[in-house]
Amino acid sequence: MLLRTEQLSKQFDGLQAISSVDFELAEGEVRGLIGPNGSGKSTFFNLVSGIYNPDAGRVWFEEKEITGMESHLTAERGIARTFQLLRMFTEMTVLENLMVGHHVHGNYNALAATFGLRHVREEDARVREEMMDLLSIIGLVDYAELPASELSIGQRRLLALGRAMAMRPKLLLLDEPAAGLSPYNVDNMMRIVMELRDRYGLTVVIIEHILRVVMEVCERVTVLDYGQKISEGTPDQVKEDPVVVEAYLGKEIKDTELHSDLKSKAEVI
Amino acid sequence: MLFNFIIIGLSLGLIYGLVALGISLIYRGIDVVHFAQGEIFMLGAFVGLVALKLHEGSVPYWLALIVTTIFIGILGVVIERLFYRRLTEGGGGYTVAGMSIIICGFGMSMVLMGIAFIIWGNESKSYPVEFGPAIFLGEIFLPRTYIWIAVVGVVLMIVLSLFMYKTKLGLAARAVAFSRETAYLMGVNVPLMISLIFGLGCAVTGAAGVLIAPILFAQIQMGYVMILKAFAAAVVGGFGSLPGAILGGVIVGLFETLCAGYLWDEYKDIYAFFLMLVVLMIRPSGLLGTTVKVKA
Amino acid sequence: MIDKTLATAASPLARLRAMHPLVPWVLTGIVLVPLPWLALNEYQIYMIDFTCVMILASVGLNIIKGFAGQVTVGHIGLFAIGAYSSAILSLNFGFPFWLSLPCAVAITAMAGLIVGIPSFRLEGAYLALVTLGLSESVRLFIIVTPYLGGTIGIGNIPAPQIGDFAFDNWTRYYFLLMPVTLLGIYCSFRILGSRVGRAFKALREDPIAAAAAGINVRRYKLLAFFISAIYAGTAGAMWAHMDPGYISPNSITLLEMVTMLLIVVLGGIGNIWGGIIGAIIVTIVHDLTAPYPWYQFVLYGGFIVITVLYMPKGIGGLIDRYFVTRRFIEARKRRLKDAT
């Protein structure tokens, strides 16, 4: 198992955000993580990637425990993530944003940088080229020297993906990567994600609300509600699971007085 | 001797508390840490002096106090409208934008100090008031100024609380402090409330200046000395908490006076800073405050 | 950032830089050699020297504020530590300048680290307060400590010497200051254009995203304080040994801090070139208005307020905008050309 959690729990001021979640992810999987708003999906990512410390439970990555490990350390281990709220470095250029992502693999320290030693310049040039290649894969190569603030929302989502990819991760956690995108851009984004996954042998977990993405792209789906895992399986299995349906839609509307009342009014109109 | 230290410490502490009250009020209301609050305090002292000297010095102290408080409040509103408005709209926070407000406040404090020099010069000016002989409670020596400070301080706190919690305008101000967007949607005149909050914070601080001036005299650098102590008070009591500001002020005042009395008095001005540092490292939210550091 | 790699690799500047990035700076140094002889009088040479010191200090301040985004108002305290350390080491311990300077810089760097520790838990205004308080504490400590000269200050700080040759007048000192300043500017560009600089910028904008990208936020904050303290310490020590070799707490007051702040704000926080231009402008203005110190408060404070309100990116921002716009237009022209 690439990623494993056991009885993971986290509460905020009395609200149980994540409650005893067991999770297993095999290498190479594309897993969907879905659930109604507030069900704890982003919190789950934050617990794994190190932004929050769990109150209880443990997390393993590549069979080594990473419970409570800080963000930059999980990043070094190979866990990359994007954020629901983008978190772009708007004042840096597109290329620089990617180069920051590559930071984990950098080889020189501040002292070497200060004196402009040859290997520093060579490494920077090499990284720059690698990042330009990455930019062509995600389709942003023309915008390399522009400040990130000049990009449209679709391009920014791609940039976030690119920055995560620049880390050469083993596990990619995407938090609503297609939120706010037009259907064309959603397809484009998903196509690029799958291409990257095939090319670099990634494992991906996607939080998404767009049903089409989950159905078409994910091999398995995990469903959270009120911080608990309520279902897991293939997209089709999960879609039919009554527990999942109830979580999203509430109980079926029975033939209540209100229902017939509305029906009769509708007939009049 | 100890009792005298306590009296002094409490009174000084109340003054720190009033300035801290202004700072916390502004912070709570509009998310701005006003670095120029020390100069507002200093201007309070000087404007009070001017008020006292009107009509050939026949203005009574209490009237000068009221007039100065109102004047400084209005001055605060003017400064806010002219200068800070552009920045408060962008929101506070710890980005480059947030840094701008701090730097702007810093610059403003320089401007105010310089203007004060141009008008009044560098010497300390004493207050032409006679309160009458000091009161002796047994061995305790209680100059009347301290009574003024205590009484007026408490009155100000009560008036402010009544305003905040018992009037509609106060409710509107609290709404703006809680969430500006929601207040807008509820029909509150948010820009007016922002100015009101700022003005109130400055008024309270200006009053503090008038209250302490009979003891410390009016000196243009008093703001610079005050700002660190007032911030220390706000931090100790909990930044943004109004009762905390007064409580923190009293604690700082007592701590500083006792340390200066029993330890080295050369380092008098550093004790408050030291206390603030300790609180910041151990319990940044202070005694009564709640700070929330936002995560992803 | 600096390397406009896309289409202009053949420009002469790029060719020079391709040899070694230090080359254009060495050439600049050579070009600047005759500067003292262009001055009209001794005092102007002093001004040039003083400007170099201010440039060094402002580069350091720019690194910590503009790049790491830490709100510090205590740079002058570090400057003082550098100046006083070097003075004490050379006067009371007989260190030659060439030893006291690095030692003073090391001491200041350590102090910078200490200042950096609160920055882990404090943000924005809290950090500003703490650094302000620390800086004031340094000044107060100097005043009440006779060993450090108290309010009278320390005089007769020896000028640097090589054998019999002493850098004891402003012209000679220039040949020490100018290369050090150029080196300082060069090093800052190298740091900021490297992964270290990018890490700084990332951590300024969004520490959470930076951490998620693998940047150890605590370490880089400390590093930023460390580096900026090195600059402040160097500037302070060089200032101390400059003719007339006298330092006192009066030269490290609030006014000096505001002057430094103005330089950085006017030049654009985080913009090295802007800071250099700002240093030159402000130093000249500072000198012209020296007879009226309190008016300086109004002037500097007023300019800080106005710049923050109306020109938030400072002069450097205007320069940057010009270049970015030019690059954008060229990129667009190129894209149109490719399309046809």
Image (tube, rainbow, N blue to C red):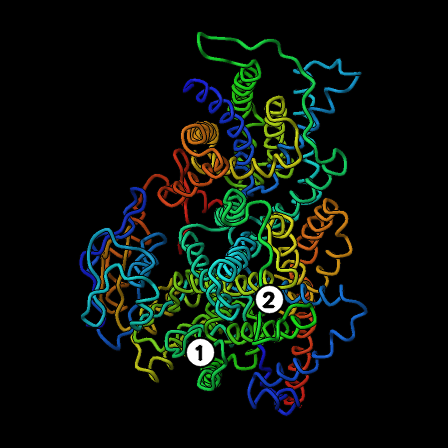
In the rendered image, residues at marks 2 and 1 fall on the same chain:
no
In the image, residue C235 lies at what x, y percent? 57, 63
Task: For mark 2, name the chain.
Answer: C
Relative side of B143 to C32, left or right = left
Image label count:
2
In the image, residue A126 lies at what x, y percent? 45, 86
- When the figure is inspected, residue A31 is found, relative to residue B218, above or below; the finding is below
Q: Which mark lies nearer to you, 2 or 1? A: 2
In the image, residue C321 lies at what x, y percent? 67, 69
Relative side of B232 to B206, left or right = left
What residue is shown with label 2? C159
What residue is shown with label 1? A112
For the residue marked with disc 1, what is the amino acid? Answer: Ala
Relative side of A207 to C128, left or right = left
In the image, residue B251 lies at what x, y percent? 43, 29
* Closest to the observer, C297 or C218: C297
Relative side of A170 to C75, left or right = left
